[in-house]
Image (cartoon, grey):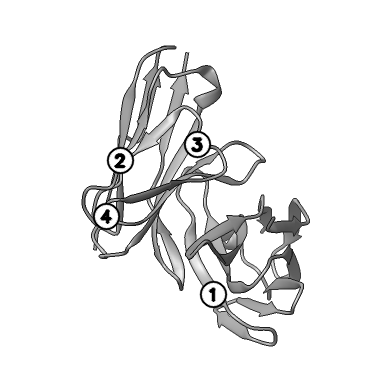
Amino acid sequence: EDQVTQSPEALRLQEGESSSLNCSYTVSGLRGLFWYRQDPGKGPEFLFTLYSAGEEKEKERLKATLTKKESFLHITAPKPEDSATYLCAVQARTGGSYIPTFGRGTSLIVHP
Amino acid sequence: NAGVTQTPKFRILKIGQSMTLQCTQDMNHNYMYWYRQDPGMGLKLIYYSVGAGITDKGEVPNGYNVSRSTTEDFPLRLELAAPSQTSVYFCASSTTAGAFFGQGTRLTVV
């Protein structure tokens, strides 16, 4: 069974204080690892897809990296508008279909 | 660019009532999903579809039904609503490169 564990559950940062969120996974035959951002009362918003160990993707203050067992979402010099829940999902091929499995998310609050 | 559209946004049901949550996407994606999200529990897959006419159960299908008659539409049917179905429901469509979500339906069963 595919497993996705995100840590920490919650993170409070001061504006400008860089940090990282972790997503560890066990999956048979990874076909993609995804990061999403979710604001309160809204649906998740797609951020990144990573496919293989060593791959990195960047967007503004966010950088996602991938190893064979985990992914990190690095947040550099965060701003209050980066406050959100960040979700990680892994996708494997299950019976011919691609089904993503989500972690429980990390709730990030950035204080001004 | 509408993306994934869900209706309604909010609904209160009485125990035993039925309803259909509507989901439409305009990106011509074959894959569509229904998730429920409870506080602190992440997204749980209810049903998914890999194309028109093809649906399959996810992790938590009991009490729900789906159909996929067209590529665009993927409605979720709740029969005999129970308090345990109080949740926020999200519909999504995807390619293998990532999913796009609707804004959600907040359902309360009383």
Task: State which chain disc 3 sits on.
Answer: B
Q: Is mark 2 on a helix, strand or loop?
A: loop
Residue at image coords 67%, 50%: A104
Gap in angstroms between the C-alphas marked 3 and 2 = 14 Å
Query: In the rendered structure, are the residues bearing label 1 and label 4 in contact, judged by CB atoms less than 8 Å apart?
Result: no
Question: Do dots 3 and 2 share one subunit?
Answer: yes
> How packed is label 3: few (under 14 Cα within 10 Å), some, or many (20 or more)?
some
Comparing B24 with B3, the one in front is B24
Task: State which chain disc 1 sits on.
Answer: A
Q: Counting residues from the N terminus, which is met first, the one under dot 3 or under dot 4?
A: 4
Q: Residue A28 carries which label?
A: none
Gap in angstroms between the C-alphas marked 4 and 2 = 12 Å
Q: Residue B75 carries which label?
A: 2
Residue at image coords 38%, 48%: B55
Say how many tags the image has. Answer: 4
Q: Is residue A11 visible?
A: yes
Q: What element carries label 3?
A: loop
* Residue at mark 3: B61
Q: Which amino acid does label 2 sit on?
A: Pro
Q: Counting residues from the N terminus, which is met first, the one under dot 3 or under dot 2?
A: 3
- In this rendering, which labeled residue sits more in front, label 3 or label 2? 3
Q: What residue type is labelled 1?
A: Thr
Quadrant of the image occupied by residue B67: top left
Task: State which chain disc 2 sits on.
Answer: B
Name the quarter where the N terminus of chain A is drawn: bottom right
Question: Do dots 1 and 4 share one subunit?
Answer: no
Gap in angstroms between the C-alphas marked 3 and 4 = 19 Å
Q: What residue type is labelled 3?
A: Pro
- In this rendering, which labeled residue sits more in front, label 3 or label 1? 3
* Residue at mark 1: A49
* Residue at mark 4: B52
- In this rendering, which labeled residue sits more in front, label 1 or label 2? 2
